[in-house]
Amino acid sequence: MNNKIWRGLGVSAGRAAGPTWYLKGFQAEATPKTSESRSPEEELSRLQQAVTRTEQTLTRLEEQVKVEQGEEVAQIFVAHKLLLSDPAFIGEAQERLQKGQLSAEEALREVAEEAVKMLRGLEDPYFQERAVDVQDVLVQLLKSLQDVQEEGADLFPPTGDYVILADELTPAQTIALPKERVLGFVVRQGGKTSHAAILARTYGIPALAGVAGDWEDLKLEKWVELDGEEGWIRPSAENRIVFADSGLREEEISLPDNALQDMTLAANIGSPGDLPLVEKFKAQGIGLYRTEFLFMGEELPSEEEQVEAYRQVVAACAPQLTVIRTLDIGGDKKAPALGLPQEKNPFLGVRALRLTLRRPELFRQQLRAIWRAAASGPTAVMFPMIATLEELDQAKEALWAAREEVLQSGHDVGELQIGMMIEIPSAAWLADQFAAKVDFFSIGTNDLTQYMLAVDRENTELADLYQPYHPAVLGMIARVSQAALRRGIWTGVCGEAGGDALLAPFFRAVGIKELSMAPGSLVKVRAALGKLALSPGESESLVESVLACGSAAGVREALESFLSRQIV
């Protein structure tokens, strides 16, 4: 056995050992078609079509990561989408096409190569890493231009667990891999600030980057062992026990149930494919099953496809509860098969429940599938974006009608808890009245913050005004939770703030019973709550100090001060 050791930069802690698999990057045509047979207008049209399709792909990846790991990590793909409107990238390529001497592929390559060279020539490692982002977007555009569907990751072996070797690892490739079967990453280029490294840490996968030494020799190794903290990789005896240790201590992953004082920590997911992460991070059920991913393709799912997707999750999580949110399409989520019209302000338009109430058969089909899946274990249905009591009444009427249809068709039905999301200020204000009609509330802090502060959360120019710590937002959350407690129902938080360890003590203090978050956030929130022992007096003091603040900065300071005094 070769005793050579390769050195690299440890970018994600943990150790792994197992067989290797080399991830080949996408190879565009070596001699792309020139524009001799096409006019500049035709090449510009091809480029624009590629940009549109690539934006759709990046939006899908953004939504997937948002579900799995939260909105902050999903900003990787928001940044990629910004490149598609960058005058120095797409705009420059368009100018070169107008001269009539290049194909769309050639123009993109030229511009991207110049950008990569410029970025890699900078001294700041962060900007050097952004060269990979340019290359990733270029690959997506070239694949679209050449109508290539296959990813290198699509060739991943159908069975077995592997250590991935790659010359470069783009965020899109990282997402495409079945992460539950990835033991570790070894990347020839890159560093700690690369987006692939960030994703590896987020998913708890040991990883090395910037590997020095003879890369071609390393690619020939069939079985390796690596340390993602110390930064080394070496050959290992074949058929040695395959393992991957994320570096997380067991006490960081799980705590005794009584340590959380009757508070449930659940996971947000988007498909059955997320179940390995739910198990890995010891989620106590599913607090938000985003069903829209079934609807974001070119064709709508059948009722049977929906039943299977929901049933897998419900059965896997039983006896813990699975909360299934009905279709929440619109706003920042697109669904080509639904043919949604363009709206001037889609976040305030026909989205979520407003859409499904206008398409009753689509709605009833999903509700039938949820009733049938509920026969496999504890299940709840949750309606998104409710503003009025009348909307809730209509949704419940459709729900009970769907149950009758399922029974008449001869299928079994389960029991359902009925809940609604609180994400519109009017619903929060009328929480007492709404609480009389449902079994639970789930507060969607992303939209509640957006609507409370009149800030488009997708607008990077206004990022400083989008403040989940704003006392008005937290005051409304406290109001909703108190209304629920008076009516004897429970309240959860399923938005991005649900995975914020700094806010977790405040949520406990105001009576929130469940926090649901990206699976990767469970460890830090569980650890934060497990170190706290809040008496009723301390809870009241915390809530008063937070709600007395006049700014988000003041709230953060109050929370940090409280934690510094209370952690035991």
Image (tube, grey):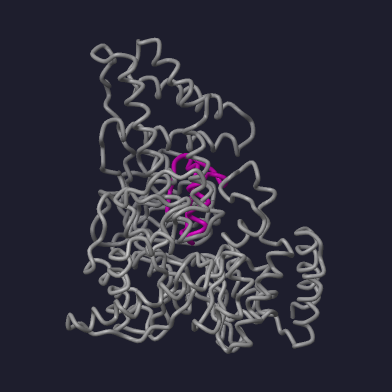
> At x 48% / y 55%, what residue is drawn?
200
- Left/right placement of residue 454 relative to residue 542 reads left
Residue at image location 40% in from the left, 52% down from the top: 175
Which of the pair 65/490 is nearer the observer?
490
- Assign the C terminus to one quadrant of the image: bottom right
- Percent x, y for residue 110? 42, 20
Instruction: Give the residue at x 46% y 61%.
Output: 68
Residue 41: image location, x then y, percent: 33, 17
Residue 478 placement: quadrant = bottom right
Q: Which residues are magenta?
A: 185-212
- Look at the image and say whether residue 190 sits in the magenta stretch: yes
521 vs 29: above or below = below
Instruction: Name the foreground residue: 196 vs 490.
Output: 490
The percent position of residue 21, horizontal first and vertical second, equals 31, 50
Task: Kindly identify the residue that appears in the image at 36 percent across and 20 percent down.
Answer: 106
In-image side of 53 versus 494 (left or right): left
Give the mark count.
Answer: 0
Measured from the top left, where is residue 467 in percent x and y? 68, 56
Which residue, as the protein is rendered here, is positioned at the far front? 390
Front position in the image: 176 or 515: 515
Residue 83 counted in the magenta span: no
